[in-house]
Amino acid sequence: MTATITVDVHDDCDTRADLRPWSELVASVLRDAGVEAPALVGVYFVDEATIAELNREHLGGVGPTDVLSFPIDTEAPPATAPDPTRVVGDIVVCPSTAERQAPGHSGDPHDEIAVLLVHAALHLVGHDHAEADERDRMWRAEQQALAAHWRPLQRDPWAARSDEVVP
């Protein structure tokens, strides 16, 4: 059996969407970033109340946000470990927030979710955007991943965010 990067997608807000493309997108981004199989990541689609509570608990934020990422294993366990699977982390997305902000960002709700998943997957493997040079590097990585594994976007999803202060 071939080792894989497993992406468990959980629809906790009943979007009734096909979740397979999201799983494939996250796995591809992680693979490109050098994550070796076997690896596991969880993706959770949640409502605004749930993501607002997570935002408050973990970041001290107020209200719902679009996406959160929670890295777990920054390195793969030794191959000799009883279970060599690397638990990369969890991604939590709020589709209603993504849909609301899409017109001003990527232009399309599905594209917005793709941007958020790529962004969060890159956070799981150590990318950050606290400093300008890190932000530029991360945004380039996001654009490359979207072009390779989703589609090149007609609008720059970060143009509206370029002046935002990132905590």
Image (cartoon, grey):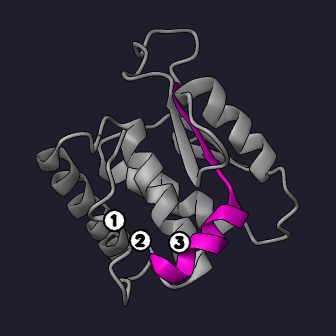
Q: Along the line of sight, which residue is nearer the eye, 72 or 128?
A: 128
Q: Residue furthest left?
A: 133
Q: x and y percent of residue 69 in the render? A: 52, 39
Whole-number angstrom distance, CA of label 2 to CA of label 3: 14 Å
Give the mark, 2 or 3, whose residue is nearer the N terminus.
3
Q: What amino acid is at disc 3?
A: Glu
Picture mark count? 3
Q: Residue at x 45, y 76 (%)?
A: 105
Q: x and y percent of residue 62 in the render? A: 62, 39
Q: What amino acid is at disc 2?
A: His
- Report the quarter where the C terminus lies: top left
Q: Along the line of sight, which residue is nearer the eye, 154 or 165?
A: 165
Q: Are marks 2 and 1 in contact (CB under 8 Å)?
A: yes
Residues in magenta?
86-106
Secondary structure type for disc 2: helix
Which residue is label 2 attached to?
A: 149
